[in-house]
Image (tube, grey):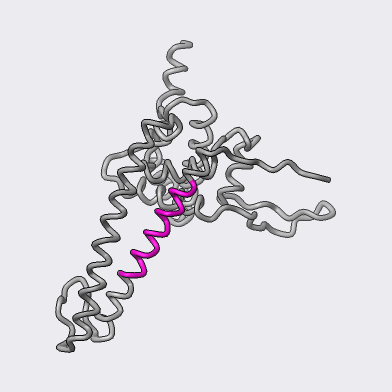
Amino acid sequence: MLKEVYHSGEDAIYLRKLVNGYEDIVRSGVRLKNQRSAFFRCEGLDHKKDKCISKNESIHFILKEIDKQIELNESVKKNYNLEFKKLSCKYKEIGLLKSLPGIGAIHAVQILAVVVNIRRFKRRGHFLSYCGLIKHEKMSGGRSYGKRQPRYYRPLKQVFKMASHIVIQEICNNPLKEFYEYQVNKKQKSPQIARHNVARRLAVLVYGVLKTGQKFDPYRREKSIREKS
C-alpha cells in the first residue's frame, strides 16, 4: 500500500528557494503598488496621472516612503532577473525551455524548479494533470458524473497561463499564436477556451522538449517528411 515519493537533489532545492524568494518579492511589490493607488482612490484621483492628492503632510510622507520601497523592490527584482539569466548557462534544460515561444528565463527557471526531472511523469497526461490543465472524468458503475479538477500545483499553472498571454500578444507570428487564431476564427472557440488550449499545447511542448533534450523546432515534422521523400 506504500507509494514511491519523489525526492529532488540539492540543485533543485536551490532553484526552489530562488523561485520562492522571487515570488515573495513580486507579491510585496504588488502590495506596495496597491497601497499607493489606494490613497489616490480615496480622493477620486488616478495614481498614474495625478501626483499630488492632498495638502496633508502626513499623507505626502507616507507616499514618499512607499515610493522608496517600490524603487527598492524593483532593484531587487532586477538582481533576481540577472541571476536567472546566469542560470541559463549552468542548466541545459533552461536553454531548452527558452527555445519555446512565450517562455523566458524566469518562466524557465520556475518550470525547472518544480519539474526537476520530466521522466518522473510517465505520460504527458500525468504532467498536464499536475499542471491543472486537464480535468478527470468521474466514473462510477460505468456511468459518468461529470468532470473534476485534479489536485495540481497552482504556481505551475499560473506560469503556463501567463506564457499563453505572452504568446498571443506578441507582434511577430509564431506557431502557438497561429494555433490561437485558428481556434478562434476557424473552430469558433471563445478567447478564454482558446487561451486555455494554447497553455495546454505549451505544456505538451515543454514535456516533449525536456524528454527529448532537443530545442523546439516548429518545422521539425516537415523536415523529416522531406528527408524521407
Q: Mostly what secondary structure, the magenta segment?
A: helix
In depth, the one of 79 and 141 nearer the eye is 79
Image coords of residue 194 (percent x, y): 46, 51
Instruction: Please check the rendered image and state whether residue 22 is part of the magenta-colored stretch, yes or no.
Output: yes
Image coords of residue 39 (percent x, y): 27, 81
| Residue bounds of the magenta highlight | 16-32
Q: Specify whether 182 is left or right of 155.
A: left
Residue occupying image coordinates x 50% and y 38%? 11
Residue occupying image coordinates x 24% and y 86%? 43
Q: Specify whether 158 is left or right of 4.
A: left
Question: Of all residues shown, which one is farthest toward the bottom?
Answer: 56
Residue occupying image coordinates x 61% and y 47%? 129
Image coords of residue 4 (percent x, y): 73, 41
In depth, the one of 102 and 195 nearer the eye is 102
In depth, the one of 6 and 179 nearer the eye is 6
Q: Specify whether 41 is left or right of 92.
A: left
- In the rendered image, which quarter is residue 190 located in? bottom left
Q: Is residue 177 visible?
A: no
- In the rendered image, which quarter is residue 42 located in? bottom left
Instruction: Please check the rendered image and state whether residue 173 is part of the magenta-colored stretch, yes or no.
Output: no
- Does 52 sit above or below residue 120? below
Image coords of residue 172 (percent x, y): 27, 40
Q: Is residue 59 visible?
A: yes
Question: Of all residues shown, which one is farthest toward the front?
Answer: 10
Q: Quadrant of the N terminus?
A: top right
- In the rendered image, which quarter is residue 74 located in? bottom left
